[in-house]
């Protein structure tokens, strides 16, 4: 902030700065509380003993019985939680692999090879990202059962690339445009073919783009609920979000402690990773860089 | 003279389209064809148990239009999308104007305030379901300590997910909670992409804050606000998880939206054709947002 004329006195400038900070903070506090409180509430619920959850006569924001790991214990030993985590990891691995193998070459071709219709093809691929699951899930149910994948987490490996490929192709297309042409030309003068230049020169300098694609394959897959709900109904085959949301309820009884424990244990790491890459997500879809 | 297919240009094209083929095939097979297939399904009497479907023309669409529940779902979808969209716009703009200031701890505040958007949606909806519990809601605890509502069991004890108007409000609230950080960050991206030199130049030329805001900031961030809103509309219109997990359309259809109606008809009740027809009613609602995005993306320059 440039010092304007007349604010030469350092003390008055400082008071003004302090006042400005207070004003900004007081505007931000409601937003912060509303954004963060649910996390706090879920965490404390996960660590409370059952009777401590159902007391309305005391301030509920802290423990009135000693904290407990019982809810986590229940999750790991009495439910399929471990299977759900393994399923989620496996799904993420295969979805990332499929996405990289298809989106990297596609993004490269669209960005670098001066193909006719490249721009329109790129936009066309990205537009499929916007065809929502709610329109596709019924026909895809048929596809899944034709492939013999119903009720297996493999069904999700098949369908999640329908949104990760378009998104990552778009992202990588933008990314490859920033790699200087000269390094490729130099490699080709040195005797590399077009494919050799891609594999030996362009990809090694593009690892930030590749990592970003893997991260988005993971975080976008974690945001899905509809596909897993529609295609996987066997307990052991579910990914974490679906498993937690459907298996920790018996009739009318909600196992709130374990529900919150299971939700947070996966939700928080995902949120942290997504957080670190959020600016790339925003600039990927809007074309504007966040500062 | 080399034949045309041996020229460097032709070889580059072959190489390029070969690289493109896997992505285009995958997306074509699992998005393009299913989309066409859903048009076919919507005009058939296909069901989960019966693999042989026969053509029934527009019967499924007519059946939907004759169904009272469909109109309720359509109305709720519109109220939900528009109402939540306006709230997200207002809150997002306010937050963006706060975050664009320079202050200590800005990065930390930004990281914390976007948590609702980055948390997997099913996870946070479960948290809200617990916070909206009919008897042990922490929201009600706070409100009753503040003296704003009566005791549990009294007439002014809100049952957030059990009373029709409150239930619609609650599902909208969770959508707004999840979406406002997205609006804010998109706007922030727009604001910070306005080069400070331009604003400085305008100041030197004697433009006051209002003029700078009207003539420079608004025109420059409007396209980005447009894109952000369009994306958010697509996400909101097509999201089923908030309503499905919080109320599953209840009480008595008060929060039924087209996605939950399509799911319950197509998968739960097994009437694939009817379900496909209902979900296709979303398409005309999505179309304006998609056209806006298409046009902006085409104009976009790297």
Image: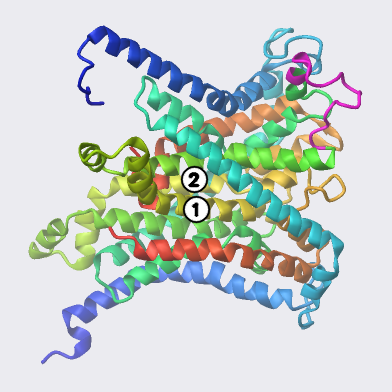
Q: Which chain contains the residue that carries disc 2?
A: A
Q: Please indicate, yes or no, whether residue A83 appears anywhere in the rendered image.
A: no
Report, in whole angstroms, how far the alpha carbon at label 2 lies from the one at label 1. 8 Å
CB atoms of marks 2 and 1 within 8 Å: yes
The residue to which callout 2 is attached is A218
The residue to which callout 1 is attached is A95
**Circle 2 sits in a helix, a strand or a loop, which is it?**
helix
Residue, x 37% and y 54% (percent of image)?
A171
Instruction: Tell me residue A173's x, y (percent).
Output: 33, 59
Compare marks 2 and 1 and give the one earlier in the sequence. 1
Which segment did they paint magenta?
A: B142-161
- Residue nearer the viewer, B225 or A216: B225
Q: In this view, does B282 lie above or below B175?
A: below
Instruction: Tell me residue A11's x, y (percent).
Output: 27, 7
Residue, x 43% and y 16% (percent of image)?
A22
- Residue nearer the viewer, A145 or B272: B272
Quick check: B109 left or right of A245?
left
């Amino acid at each position: 902030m440039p010092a304007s004329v007349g604010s030469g006195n350092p003390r008055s400038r400082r008071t003004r700065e302090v006042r400005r900070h207070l004003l900004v903070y007081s505007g931000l506090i409601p937003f912060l509380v509303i954004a963060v409180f649910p996390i706090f509430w879920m965490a404390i619920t996960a660590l409370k003993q059952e009777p401590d959850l159902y007391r309305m006569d005391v301030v509920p924001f802290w423990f009135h019985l000693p904290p407990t790991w019982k809810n986590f214990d229940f999750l790991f030993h009495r439910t399929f939680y471990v299977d759900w985590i393994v399923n989620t990891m496996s799904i993420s691995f295969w979805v990332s692999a499929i996405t990289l193998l298809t989106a990297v070459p596609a993004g490269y071709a669209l960005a670098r090879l001066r193909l006719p219709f490249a721009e329109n093809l790129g936009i066309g691929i990205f537009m499929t990202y916007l065809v929502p699951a709610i329109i596709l899930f019924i026909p895809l149910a048929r596809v899944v059962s034709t492939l013999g994948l119903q009720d297996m987490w493999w069904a999700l490996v098949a369908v999640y690339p329908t949104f990760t490929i378009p998104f990552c192709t778009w992202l990588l297309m933008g990314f490859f445009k920033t790699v200087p042409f000269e390094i490729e030309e130099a490699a080709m003068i040195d005797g590399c073919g077009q494919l050799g230049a891609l594999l030996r020169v362009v990809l090694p300098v593009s690892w930030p783009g590749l990592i970003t694609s893997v991260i988005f394959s993971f975080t976008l897959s974690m945001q899905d609920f509809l596909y897993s709900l529609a295609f996987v109904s066997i307990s052991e085959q579910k990914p974490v979000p679906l498993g937690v949301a459907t298996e920790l309820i018996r009739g009318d009884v909600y196992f709130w402690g374990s529900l919150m424990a299971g939700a947070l244990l996966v939700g928080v790491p995902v949120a942290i990773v997504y957080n670190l890459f959020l600016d790339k997500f925003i600039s990927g879809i809007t074309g504007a860089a966040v500062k | 003279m080399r034949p045309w297919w041996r020229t460097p240009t032709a070889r580059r094209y072959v190489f390029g389209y070969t690289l493109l083929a896997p992505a285009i095939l995958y997306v074509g097979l699992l998005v393009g064809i299913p989309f066409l297939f859903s048009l076919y399904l919507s005009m058939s009497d296909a069901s989960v148990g019966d693999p042989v479907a026969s053509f029934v023309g527009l019967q499924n669409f007519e059946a939907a239009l004759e169904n009272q529940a469909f109109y309720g779902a359509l109305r709720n979808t519109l109220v939900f999308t528009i109402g939540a969209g306006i709230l997200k716009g207002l809150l997002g703009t306010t937050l963006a104007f706060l975050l664009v200031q320079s202050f200590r701890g800005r990065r930390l505040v930004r990281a914390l305030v976007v948590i609702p958007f980055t948390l997997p949606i099913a996870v946070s909806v479960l948290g809200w379901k617990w916070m909206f519990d009919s008897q042990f809601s922490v929201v009600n605890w706070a409100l009753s300590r503040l003296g704003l509502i009566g005791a549990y069991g009294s007439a002014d004890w809100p049952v957030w997910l059990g009373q029709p108007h409150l239930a619609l409000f609650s599902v909208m609230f969770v959508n707004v909670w999840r979406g406002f950080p997205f609006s804010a960050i998109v706007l922030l991206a727009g604001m910070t992409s306005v080069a400070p030199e331009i604003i400085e130049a305008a100041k030197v030329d004697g433009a006051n804050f209002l003029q700078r805001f009207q003539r420079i900031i608004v025109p420059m961030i409007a396209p980005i606000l447009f894109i952000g809103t369009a994306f958010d509309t697509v996400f909101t219109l097509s999201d089923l998880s908030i309503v499905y997990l919080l109320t599953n359309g209840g009480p008595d259809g008060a929060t039924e939206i087209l996605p939950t109606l399509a799911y319950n008809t197509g998968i739960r009740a097994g009437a694939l054709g009817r379900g496909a027809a209902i979900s296709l009613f979303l398409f005309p609602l999505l179309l304006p947002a998609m056209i806006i995005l298409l046009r902006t993306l085409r104009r976009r320059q790297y």
